[in-house]
Amino acid sequence: MNARLFRSARLTCTTALCHTRGAMDPLAQIVVVVCVVAVAAALVSALLTVKKTAARAESVLHLLEREIRPMASQIGALAEELRGLSRQATRELERIGVVIRRAEEISAKLVKVAGVLGGISRVGQIAGIAAGVKRGLDVFVSRLRKRDL
């Protein structure tokens, strides 16, 4: 039914199908064929080189994967060990902070005792000793803080 709507197209041509006046010389045909063969050979050579390069890249990637997996597990273990050391260092610093605060409290009490003893006889000698002890504790505390920072 639809076939009646369309006319059949004519597939034959009455004019010459060549775009030039004369046919190509056999020598020119040989040159064209040789060029086509040379281009095909160059493409085959390039494709073989690409294939070899891809195979080499794949082998290199496999080598890298074999090397990276153990390194990744070692890095994970080292990171975990570093976390543990960091926690331990934090706990030690907290303990040192408690010791430093206690030393400061003791030195403050020694200053008060030295002040009371300053009013008693031989106060000058005892006050000098107490001041020296306080100064020594202050130096000890400051050096301990500097070392921990």
Image (cartoon, rainbow, N blue to C red):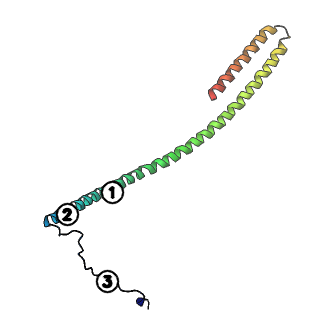
The mark found on residue 4 in the picture is: none
Up-down relation of residue 146 to residue 80 (above or below): above
Q: Residue furthest bottom?
A: 1
Cα distance, mark 2 to mark 3?
33 Å
Looking at the rendered image, the disc whose residue lies closer to the viewer, 2 or 1, is: 2
Q: Position of residue 101 (x, y in %)?
A: 74, 28
Task: Name the residue rendered at 78%, 12% in the picture.
Answer: 127
Q: Which mark is residue 10?
A: 3
Amino acid carrying label 2: it is Val
The disc labelled 1 sits on which kind of residue?
Answer: Ala
Q: Amino acid at mark 3?
A: Arg
User: Based on the displayed image, in which of its 4 quarters is residue 28 positioned?
Assistant: bottom left
Image quadrant where one finds the C terminus? top right
Q: CA distance from mark 1 to mark 3?
A: 53 Å
SS for callout 2 = helix
According to the image, label 2 marks what residue? Answer: 32
Secondary structure beneath dot 1 equals helix
Residue located beneath label 1 in the image:
55
Q: Earlier in the sequence, mark 2 or mark 1?
A: 2
Front disc: 2 or 3: 3
The residue located at (82%, 18%) in the rendering is: 112
SS label for mark 3: loop
138 and 15: which is toward the camera:
15
Q: Is residue 10 above or below residue 91?
A: below
